[in-house]
Image (cartoon, grey):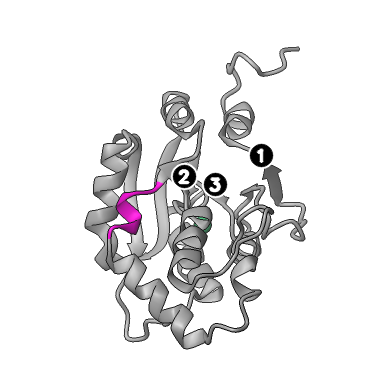
Amino acid sequence: MRIGVDIDDVIAECAAPYLRAFAKEFGVDLGDGTLGWPLLDSFTQIPKQKKDEFRMNLYDGTFFSELECYPGCTDALPRLVAAGHEVHFITARSERRRRITAEWLERKGLLRHAASLQLKPIGDFVPRSYDSSGSGEYKAAVARRLELDRFCEDDPIIARRLVDERVPVFLFDRPWNGDLAHPLVHRVRDWDEVVRELVPEHPGAQRA
Ligand SMILES: [Mg+2]
């Protein structure tokens, strides 16, 4: 199978360090709950323009080079490849982030397992805010071009767009995607679950 794999919040832990940096910048309290993207919307005292400026400045710095991998993905990717699957990293990060993204994947030992790394082309219109529906269009186009059989994703709007394209999605369980249910959406807790689904000889797999 050809498998598309999102990077942020699927391979790289992104939301929690983002929110911690955000809290430090604006002096807000993150509370004791899980650090998920919806928490950003709760800080209504900070103007949207300030939030967007923060995001662009953070992304222009070292943020992407300092992220941690989710546990399990460094084991899962080589297993998927060994089982004959083809892995493509497909991120809505801008093409101008290719170098920082490729270097990070290389440093984490992940790049060598991938057949390609796809980033969003620098177009005429670059949204200043995070744009799920534009990213969904982009990933749907890549899924068509690469004839993907599966996609690993966390964003519910992007996942919804992919299943509309008839691409089944492994949706990584995150605090911001609990509402999405669809016959082509297979919710997973972690990378081990993806391996169990796609690698039949996995030691944990049920045998007849
Ligand atoms: Mg993501």
Mark sitting on residue 149: 3
Q: Give me the residue at 49% from left, 74% from top.
A: 130
Please give left or right for residue 114 compared with residue 32 in the image. Answer: left
In the figure, residue 68 lies in which quadrant? top left
Q: Give me the residue at 74% from left, 59% from top.
A: 180
Residue interval drawn in magenta? 62-67
Q: Is residue 118 above or below residue 59?
A: above
Task: Kindly identify the amino acid type of the residue bearing the numbered disc 1.
Answer: Arg
Q: Is residue 124 above or below residue 108?
A: below
Task: Kindly identify the amino acid type of the residue bearing the numbered disc 2.
Answer: Ile
Report, in whole angstroms, how far the alpha carbon at label 2 lies from the one at label 1: 13 Å
How dense is the environment of label 1, judged by Cα within 10 Å: few (below 14), some, or many (20 and up)? Answer: few
Q: Which residue is mark 1?
A: 189
Please give left or right for residue 37 compared with residue 148 in the image. Answer: right
Q: Give me the residue at 59% from left, 29% from top.
A: 192
How dense is the environment of label 3, judged by Cα within 10 Å: few (below 14), some, or many (20 and up)? Answer: some
Q: Is residue 64 above or below residue 164?
A: above
Judge depth for marks 1 and 3 and give the one in front: 1
Q: Which residue is mark 2?
A: 11
Report, in whole angstroms, how far the alpha carbon at label 3 lies from the one at label 2: 19 Å
Q: Is residue 155 magenta?
A: no
Q: Are marks 3 and 2 in contact (CB under 8 Å)?
A: no
Please give left or right for residue 30 compared with residue 121 in the image. Answer: right
